[in-house]
């Protein structure tokens, strides 16, 4: 772990002073992973300014330093959702050295590739991080029977909401921060993602340690450290989501061109930066 320290706004976390992380947590109505849906917390203007300053201060920090900041400011109320993409696997490799007890989970929609699901054991063996699978109470069979067939074919936004967004929203109750593996160079949509920002959709501080990294830097780390990754990436799938909504990309295509191909949809809604302050 890096010994470098940043002069960052961290808020006053003492219970007596009502520092902003404490206030944020009490707004959430204490809960545990898997708890029932609660009111989504709202950040004050003062808090938003704190996050903005933290983000600016971390612009030149390494991903490890950003993760360390996240741990120091939010653990044990820090979490991470991973789909085991290359970026997620790299963050897990760093987290394994910094704080492997951070609660990490996978949104198991029931539609994931087996190759993706198999990564859980490889990550656990290598880094000691046991990624939890969390999903809808309805199996794929029950869900499709309820809707007269697969919704991903005609209402993918609804399907993503039911199988991912709603589950995530319920599952993060009680946490104050979550980490994501998004990179600014992945798409125009993600280009304005801050290192630290307020995710108003889920009422969490969102930390993106790899926002400033390139695809090449991610893959260099994977190669240099032999980080486990999804074998589908070697078969033409630079971005892997659910099986029905992912195809291999052609030479020269955008790395996310294989996601919801043939539709206007480009994001599942987890990382819709437009919705963030
Ligand atoms: Fe459904 Fe496709 Fe979204 Fe997966 S990616 S939740 S299958 S619409």
Image (cartoon, rainbow, N blue to C red):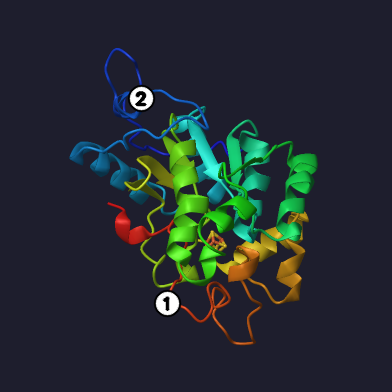
- Return the residue at label 1: 264
Kindly identify the residue that appears in the image at 71 percent across and 57 percent down.
116
Q: Residue 112: give x, y in percent of width and height.
A: 66, 58
Give the CA distance from mark 2 to mark 1: 37 Å
Relative to the observer, which residue lies in front, 66 or 21? 21
Q: Residue at coordinates 32% horizontally, 46% vertically from top-left?
A: 200
First in sequence, mark 2 or 1: give its number. Answer: 2
Measuring from the top left, give residue 261's x and y in whole percent. Answer: 54, 78
Q: Residues within 10 Å of mark 2 (few under 14, many from 20)?
A: some
- Residue sitting at the far left: 45
Residue 105: which quarter of the image?
A: top right
Q: Which mark is residue 29?
A: 2
Q: Quadrant of the N terminus?
A: top right
Of 59 and 95, the residue lying toward us: 95
Quarter of the rendering containing residue 28: top left
Ligand 1 lies under 8 Å from the Cβ of mark 1 = no
Q: Helix or strand or loop: what does disc 1 sit on?
A: loop
Q: Are marks 2 and 1 in contact (CB under 8 Å)?
A: no
Mark 1: few/some/many CA within 10 Å (<14, 14-19, 20+): few
Foreground: 140 or 220?
A: 140
Q: Give 272 or 185, whichever is nearer the viewer.
A: 272
């Amino acid at each position: 772990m890096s010994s470098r320290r940043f002069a960052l706004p961290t808020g006053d976390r003492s219970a007596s002073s009502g520092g902003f992380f404490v206030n944020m947590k009490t707004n959430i109505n204490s809960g545990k992973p898997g708890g029932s849906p609660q009111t989504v917390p709202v950040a004050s203007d003062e808090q938003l300014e704190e996050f903005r300053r933290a983000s600016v201060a971390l612009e030149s920090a390494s991903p490890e330093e950003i993760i360390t900041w996240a741990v120091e400011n939010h653990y044990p109320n820090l979490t991470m959702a991973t789909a085991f993409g290359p970026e997620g696997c790299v963050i897990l490799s760093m987290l394994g050295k910094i704080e492997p007890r951070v609660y990490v989970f996978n949104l198991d929609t029931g539609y994931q590739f087996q190759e993706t699901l198999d990564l859980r054991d490889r990550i656990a063996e290598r880094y000691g991080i046991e990624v939890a699978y969390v999903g809808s109470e309805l199996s794929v069979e029950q869900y499709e029977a309820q809707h007269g067939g697969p919704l991903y074919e005609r209402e993918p936004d609804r399907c993503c909401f039911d199988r991912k967004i709603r589950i995530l929203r319920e599952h993060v109750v009680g946490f104050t921060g979550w980490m994501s593996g998004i990179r600014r160079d992945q798409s125009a949509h993600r280009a304005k993602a801050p290192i630290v920002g307020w995710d108003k959709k889920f009422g969490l501080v969102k930390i993106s340690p790899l926002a400033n990294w390139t695809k090449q830097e991610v893959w260099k780390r994977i190669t240099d450290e032999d980080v486990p990754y999804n074998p589908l990436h070697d078969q033409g799938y630079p971005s892997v989501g659910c099986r029905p909504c992912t195809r291999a990309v052609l030479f020269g295509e955008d790395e996310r061109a294989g996601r919801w191909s043939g539709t206007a949809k480009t994001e599942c809604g987890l990382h819709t930066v437009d919705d963030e302050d």
